[in-house]
Image (cartoon, coloured by chain):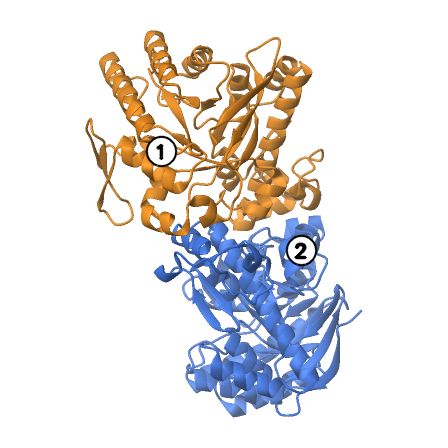
Chain colours: A blue, B orange
């Protein structure tokens, strides 16, 4: 079945929307935060843990999966869901972002990109067609088109060329797609130029994708530009399709971007910052490595219902993070992923209750970023 | 209450013994494998997981705990059990082994040892008296004397001197001990000299410790010498006290050493080898990184009842270990720790049933080492 988006409610005072995305592997309540599970696991956690936490959908990275395990193994085992034993939705990026971040190790042409494998130094090739074929092999519930990413501060002509090629590739991706159950999102480019964003959104909407991502942000522009173009681009997209802001972000970013009308997010912050001992709470960040936590018998957040807050003290997490024990990383990653899920729940609930704008205002002004 | 050892059963065909060690934090069924929890966690696992697995006792490393969190914090939070939230028994080594492994960063005298901290490069000092005081601050259920470790291939006179100082320090440790609930084990030295082993065992037994460790092995001697001196030393020790073989070992080592009359073991193998993707089973080792596991839909061991074997395939664990995902390390560490606990259960059960010798023979001859 093709992807379907139910539009349930809208906040009366902002663009925030409450919806449901129906995929071949189940329904996602939106706004949703997707946990990053690059190689098959949300870093330090296992499926039982992310199920307990309430993770609805995980993201696989096409670039990394293309290199390992690669198309042959993924095909033989029956795709990513089967490989990792996860029966809920997954989304895959196209790999474009990673490939374009390798300036000395890739060649880009109109047909596609050639890049060097970091595993065996061999050259690999992806075209819009083979990228979609690989994402279908992965068995992704939501695939992304192969787009051309350039720094948002690039010269205007570079931004135009990248956008136009993105559109041609988006069309080729759409034509290459063979299965209903693997839905496909277009990616709006156009850097920090309103006319380009407008042209990009219109072109992609005409191609009729299952959803739309806001691409080309968090690549060099200021925070203000980023917020402006998130708002600006979201409004250009159809109400009845999900909108995805890739690679974002902090809790504040999520609240701000939901307010702009974004439905889907992914970010490595919850697990990545956990490694540095940074825990997130509704009262702000707690930096567990700080020496004043060494004797604290309280949990990360006494009001948090997660397993880690119910069982472990800050003193213990301080000791583990100072000693770089993987268990410390894991416990904070668990808590952070739990916090992100509860934040998204709160966002969804307040949108339905009509109190989201007040919640967002309070959160953004009272919680330290 | 002081430590008490109940002698329950002995294998009719070997020195293997079944017993119970009663400590201030509960009873341990022996022979027992102790999981290493250096800084406060069994690497990659948390307490809920090790409780599920059935870990009876964890080992803390005095050397590492002395440097971090250090005596002040441990005292302020009320000891290691309190710091880490673990209410079952713990054992601590004396730190001697680690300090003596730092040839260029320590000075040894009759009074004690001075060594350099790897954390802040400052010099730290431990004497038999301060070592025991620190282990009491840790709140260890089973403390070890500060001993002098030398390579087992050292010149005879070096072995004699190390042994004699070990005896003088053992006496000072015993005198320094102030609390019944923190029991103390002596450590038999004497390298690979039967007369020294005999002298060491007799001297320590006269001092009447709560238990005895076989020290000075796995430091340069051959496998045959090690097995011989484990057997030889174990027989020199009193039947009614627990015997501990430090830092050992592989599943084969455990089976062989139980047969020699050893009751207690600790080793980092289950969690450390997990990092390299090595899983242990009753059919031998499974090296998860090997390419032929890439498509295997079976678990590590279909006959294993652990959570990992019930849920995850070899193909998945292969992918995670090849990608160095911490989740792969953790899942195999979980399985291996589970396997070690089931092996010890099997050993305890067969001793009581009188079938241990047959089990040991089958295991040692049929399971690849």
Occupied quadrant, residue B163: top left
Q: Which residue is mark 1?
A: B178
Residue B283 drawn at (x, y percent): 64, 27
For residue A142, above or below residue B339 = below
Do callouts 2 and 1 point to residues on the same chain? no
Check the residue under mark 2 and report the chain it is in.
A
For residue B150, above or below residue A353 = above
Relative horizontal placement of residue A249, taking residue B128 as reference (left or right) = right
Residue B97 drawn at (x, y percent): 33, 30
As drawn, the label of residue A220 is: none
As drawn, the label of residue A80 is: 2
Residue positioned 65% across, 13% down in the render: B358
In front here: A208 or A39? A39
In front here: A51 or A142? A51
Relative horizontal placement of residue A218, taking residue B201 as reference (left or right) = right
Relative horizontal placement of residue A209, taking residue A101 as reference (left or right) = right
For residue A62, above or below residue B39 = below
**Cα–Cα span, label 2 and label 1:** 59 Å
Q: Quadrant of the N terminus of chain A?
A: bottom right
Relative horizontal placement of residue B287, taking residue B233 as reference (left or right) = right
The extreme right residue here reads A1
Considering the numbered disc 1 on the image, is that residue within a helix, a strand or a loop?
loop
């Amino acid at each position: 079945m093709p992807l379907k988006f139910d539009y349930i409610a809208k906040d009366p005072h902002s663009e925030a929307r409450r919806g449901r995305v129906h995929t071949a592997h189940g329904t996602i309540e939106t706004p949703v935060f997707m946990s990053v599970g690059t190689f098959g696991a949300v870093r330090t956690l296992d499926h039982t843990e992310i199920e307990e936490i309430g993770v609805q959908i995980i993201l696989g990275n096409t670039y990394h999966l293309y290199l390992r395990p690669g198309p042959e193994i993924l095909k033989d085992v029956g795709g990513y869901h089967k490989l990792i034993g996860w029966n809920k939705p997954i989304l895959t990026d196209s790999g474009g972002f990673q490939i374009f971040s390798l300036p000395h190790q890739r060649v880009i042409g109109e047909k596609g990109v050639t890049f060097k494998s970091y595993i065996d130094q061999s050259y690999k090739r992806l075209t819009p067609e083979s990228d979609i074929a690989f994402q279908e092999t992965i068995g992704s519930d939501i695939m992304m088109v192969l787009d051309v990413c350039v720094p948002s501060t690039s010269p205007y002509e570079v931004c135009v060329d990248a956008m136009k090629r993105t559109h041609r590739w988006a069309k080729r991706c759409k034509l290459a797609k063979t299965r209903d159950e693997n839905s496909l999102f277009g990616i709006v480019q156009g850097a920090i130029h309103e006319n380009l964003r407008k042209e990009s959104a219109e072109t992609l909407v005409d191609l009729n994708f299952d959803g739309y991502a806001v691409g080309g942000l968090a690549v060099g522009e200021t925070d203000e530009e980023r917020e402006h173009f998130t708002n600006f681009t979201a409004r250009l997209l159809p109400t009845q399709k999900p909108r995805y802001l890739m690679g974002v972000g902090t809790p504040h970013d999520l609240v701000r971007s939901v307010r702009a009308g974004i439905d889907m997010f992914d970010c490595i912050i919850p697990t990545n910052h956990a490694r540095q001992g940074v825990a997130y709470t509704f009262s702000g960040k707690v930096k567990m490595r700080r020496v004043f936590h060494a004797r604290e018998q309280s949990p990360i957040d006494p009001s948090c219902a997660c397993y880690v807050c119910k069982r472990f003290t800050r003193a213990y997490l301080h000791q583990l993070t100072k000693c770089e024990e993987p268990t410390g990383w894991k416990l904070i990653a668990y808590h952070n992923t739990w916090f992100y899920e509860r934040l998204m729940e709160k966002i969804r609930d307040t949108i339905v209750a009509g109190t989201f704008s007040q919640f967002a205002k309070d959160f953004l002004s009272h919680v330290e970023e």
